[in-house]
Image: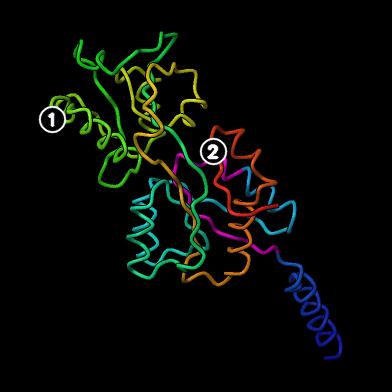
Amino acid sequence: MVRWSLILILSLASVVGCRPKSDERKQTLTVFVAASLTDVTRDFASEFTKQTGIIVETSVAASGILRRQIEGGAPCDVFISADATEMNLLAEKRGVVESSRRELARNQLVIVASGEQEEWSSVDPLLASKRKIAIGDPRYVPAGRYAERELKDLKLWDELQDRLVLADNVRVALQYVKSHQVDVAIVYKTDAMTSDCSVVFRFPTESAKIACFGATCTRSANQPDANAFLDMMVASKQDDIWTRHGFVPVRHDAD
């Protein structure tokens, strides 16, 4: 009897000993990020982990898809959208803490083609031949909405309708060009920098404000750290992370 009691005690001690202490468990922060901001956000995540020890996990998709997932109850601490539209829609459903919302950085829209190409002086080459054009699906991809707005301003939207190939996100649109499934794609300048495609046209930056936004999710159980992550993204000492990826950082502090 004594022998079996001793074995039981040792077994329980072994199980308890294998359990990690609560203060030793790695804390995590979940960030839902638009596809066009994948690389820059991962750099910020790495820096945040270095500074705080908190692991940042990212979930990447089109802004509209991420917004719907959050509305559906998906666990998320920080939402980073490639435009104000999806952020506004989520705010209307009280999905983000309005006071935490920040404009993070700005971007530019460009047209890219595969291989070495000379830059165009206008968008006329889009009409010169039956080129297939990839854009993000405007229903839920901000880059697609920006492209639609630009083409409508140029009175080209209706004329190009039958040649548009809609992509699930801006990175997919870029991949369509790289794999020669389309002739050109309208993407962000920052995405073009990640590929060996040629930028053949740059839409004027003054023609449209192209900006990305971040906010803490209302259901986040870790709002202080979520706010700290956003604070780091807009701190001037981190501007080099934005500029390294081709973004123009937005000033929020005076340090």
x, y percentage for residue 112? 39, 20
Residue occupying image coordinates x 63% and y 39%: 241
Q: Nearer the viewer, residue 17 or 140?
A: 140
Image coordinates for residue 44, horizontal then vertical, percent: 63, 47
Circle 2 residue:
248
Label 2 – label 1 distance at C-alpha: 32 Å
> Closer to the camera, 32 or 187?
187
Q: In this view, does 142 lie above or below 216?
A: above
Residue 191 is a magenta residue: no
Residue type at numbered disc 1: Asp
Image coords of residue 27 (percent x, y): 67, 64
Q: Determine which residue is flagged by label 1.
A: 158
Q: Residues within 10 Å of mark 1 (few under 14, many from 20)?
A: few
Q: What residue type is labelled 2?
A: Val
* Image marks 2 and 1: residues in contact by CB distance under 8 Å: no
Residue reaching furthest to the bottom? 1
Which residues lie in the magenta part? 26-42
Q: Does label 2 or label 1 sit earlier along the sequence?
A: 1
In the image, taking residue 208 as reference, residue 8 lies left or right, namely: right
When asked about the image quadrant of residue 14, the answer is bottom right
Q: Residues within 10 Å of mark 2 (few under 14, many from 20)?
A: some
Camera-near label (2 vs 1) is 2
Residue pictured at 18% horizontal, 30% vertical = 157
Q: Dot 1 lies on which element?
A: helix
Q: Where is residue 25 in the image (x, y as percent from the top left)?
A: 71, 66
The mark tally for this picture is 2
Instruction: Residue at 49%, 68% (x, y): give it.
Output: 99
The reply to whether the magenta stretch includes residue 31 is yes
Residue 200 found in image quarter? top left
Which structural element holds mark 2? strand
Q: In which quarter of the image is the N terminus?
A: bottom right
Looking at the image, residue 233 lies above or below residue 227? above
